[in-house]
Image (cartoon, grey):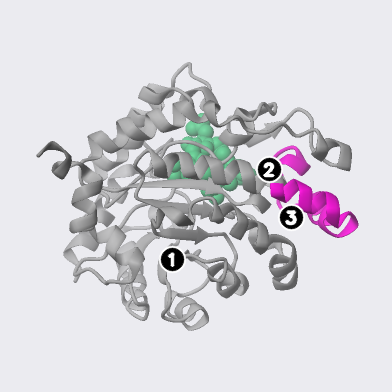
């Protein structure tokens, strides 16, 4: 019967290694994928993107789907990650945000006052149609390889809205959190709503897992994170909990926050390169899977140096209930993609 061979049915009966690992059932071979595996490290990506604005590429279903598939074909990774951006739901709500090459998301009018927050527009669910279409196209092509959907966590999204662009320490954002807690709560509630809807659209269209990127949460104290940020990350994930797909929570420099990030209610936590995985496991316990944490800097080291690092990461990952190998942050744009393929081959051969 046709519907018996649909990928989601196959996955329910015999889940792929990645989904098993996220759920805590350690597969024989460690699954591997790379944050930012789609993108500028691939010549085929650079070629496809010529003449197309970043956010326009994300909203073109055929293009977004093809870019998502490129690294899966090339590297044989255990998952695709949907090609999009955390600011896509901001743009789809009608906020003027652009991605400036070499810089990142930039807003014409930053959101800083109670009046700015009150005038943020709602996200019309119909606007998510290109996302649903791109995911459906991609899942159909991927067959049994799972697709990971993702969204930005409310704090990281809010930091772009308040700062107006990329920022190292998010000073204005963290000042607003303390100076005007009501405006802060309204802003993070808006972010949670749009980002939760963006993630839900991907999961409903066929993505098999969801990753919440709180990339810049590492600049927060544990107290600020717990009080002013975590409740809104949890709210964003409430939008998808009924779908019962595995959820992953990642940030950079979040060693001190890992247990609090786990407590938002996820199946796996992503760990950057600063904290050895066995120490991360000591902090989060056996109730979650860990994901990480190759140092992206070592992608340019001679292979024997990188191989020794890989072995170390794989061995430390054995402290966890299950481990998904990834980088500690995204693939740097100037990475030699053949190194990524070699990592996948090595991890798949390493029991
Ligand atoms: O022209 C280009 O190629 C633009 C570069 C680029 C790409 C390829 C941007 C701009 N976004 C993306 C795609 C993207 N963004 C993906 C694709 C899927 C994949 O991983 O292969 C994902 C998951 C994101 C998510 C994203 N966007 C995050 C969270 C992940 C992370 O790296 O921490 C963040 C913080 C953004 C904002 C953003 N978008 C783009 C850039 C350069 C940035 C970061 C800017 C900054 O440092 O503040």
**Label of residue 169 in the image:** 3
Mark 1, mark 2: which one is toward the viewer?
1
Tell me which residue sits at (66%, 57%) in the image: 232
> From this viewpoint, is residue 93 visible?
yes
Q: Position of residue 69 (x, y in %)?
A: 30, 36
The vertical placement of 164 against 59, above or below, is: below
The earlier-in-sequence mark between 3 and 1 is 3
Q: Quadrant of residue 47?
A: top left
Where does the magenta region start and end?
160-189
* Mark 1 crowd level (few <14, some 14–19, many ≥20, 10 Å Cα): many
| Residue 175 part of the magenta-drawn span | yes
Residue 305 visible, this orientation:
no
For mark 1, give the secondary structure. Answer: strand
Ligand 1 within 8 angstroms of badge 2 C-beta? yes
Q: Ligand 1 closer than 8 Å to the CB at disc 1?
A: no
**Within 8 Å: ligand 1 and the Cβ of disc 3?**
no
Residue 268 is labelled as: 1
On screen, residue 21 above or below 142: below
> Dot 2, how many residues are within 10 Å of its Cα: few (below 14), some (14-19), or many (20+)?
some
The CA distance from mark 2 to mark 3 is 9 Å
Asked if marks 1 and 2 touch (Cβ < 8 Å), the reply is no
Residue under the point 60% across and 64% down? 253
- For the N terminus, the quadrant is top left
Disc 1/disc 2 C-alpha distance (Å) = 27 Å
Q: Position of residue 305 (x, y in %)?
A: 34, 65
In the shown orientation, is residue 340 left or right of residue 171?
Answer: left
User: Mark 3 Cα within 10 Å, few/some/many (few <14, many 20+)?
Assistant: some
- In this figure, which residue is indicated by the disc labeled 2? 166
Q: Is residue 82 above or below residue 51?
A: below
Q: Residue furthest right?
A: 179
């Amino acid at each position: 019967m046709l519907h018996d061979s649909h990928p989601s049915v196959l996955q329910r009966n015999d889940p792929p290694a990645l989904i098993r690992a996220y759920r805590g059932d350690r597969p024989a071979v460690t699954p591997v994928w790379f944050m930012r595996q789609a993108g500028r490290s691939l010549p085929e990506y650079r070629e496809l993107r010529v003449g197309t604005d970043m956010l326009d590429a994300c909203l073109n279903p055929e293009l977004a789907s093809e870019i998502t598939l490129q690294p899966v074909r090339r590297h044989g990774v255990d998952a695709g990650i949907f090609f999009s951006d955390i600011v896509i739901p901001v743009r789809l709500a009608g906020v003027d945000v652009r991605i400036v090459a070499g810089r990142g998301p930039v807003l014409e009018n930053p959101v800083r006052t109670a009046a700015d927050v009150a005038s943020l527009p709602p996200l019309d669910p119909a606007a998510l149609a290109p996302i649903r279409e791109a995911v459906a196209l991609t899942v159909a092509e991927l067959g049994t390889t799972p697709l990971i959907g993702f969204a930005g966590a409310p704090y990281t999204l809010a930091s772009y809205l308040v700062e107006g662009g990329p920022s190292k320490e998010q000073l204005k954002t963290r000042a607003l959190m303390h100076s005007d807690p009501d405006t802060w709560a309204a802003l993070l509630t808006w972010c949670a709503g749009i980002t939760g809807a963006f993630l839900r659209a991907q999961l409903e269209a066929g993505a098999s897992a969801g990753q919440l990127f709180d990339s810049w949460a590492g600049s927060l104290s544990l107290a600020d994170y717990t009080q002013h940020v975590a409740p809104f990350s949890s709210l964003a994930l409430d939008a998808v909990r009924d779908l019962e797909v595995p959820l992953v929570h990642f940030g950079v420099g979040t060693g001190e926050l890992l247990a609090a990030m786990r407590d938002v209610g996820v199946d796996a936590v992503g760990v950057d390169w600063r904290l050895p995985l066995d120490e991360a496991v000591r902090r989060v316990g056996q109730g979650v899977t860990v994901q990480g944490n190759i140092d992206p800097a070592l992608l340019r080291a001679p292979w024997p140096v990188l191989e020794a690092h890989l072995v170390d990461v794989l061995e430390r990952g054995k402290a966890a209930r299950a481990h998904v190998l990834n980088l500690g942050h995204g693939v740097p744009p100037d990475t030699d993609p053949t190194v990524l393929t070699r990592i996948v081959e090595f991890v798949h051969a390493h029991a």
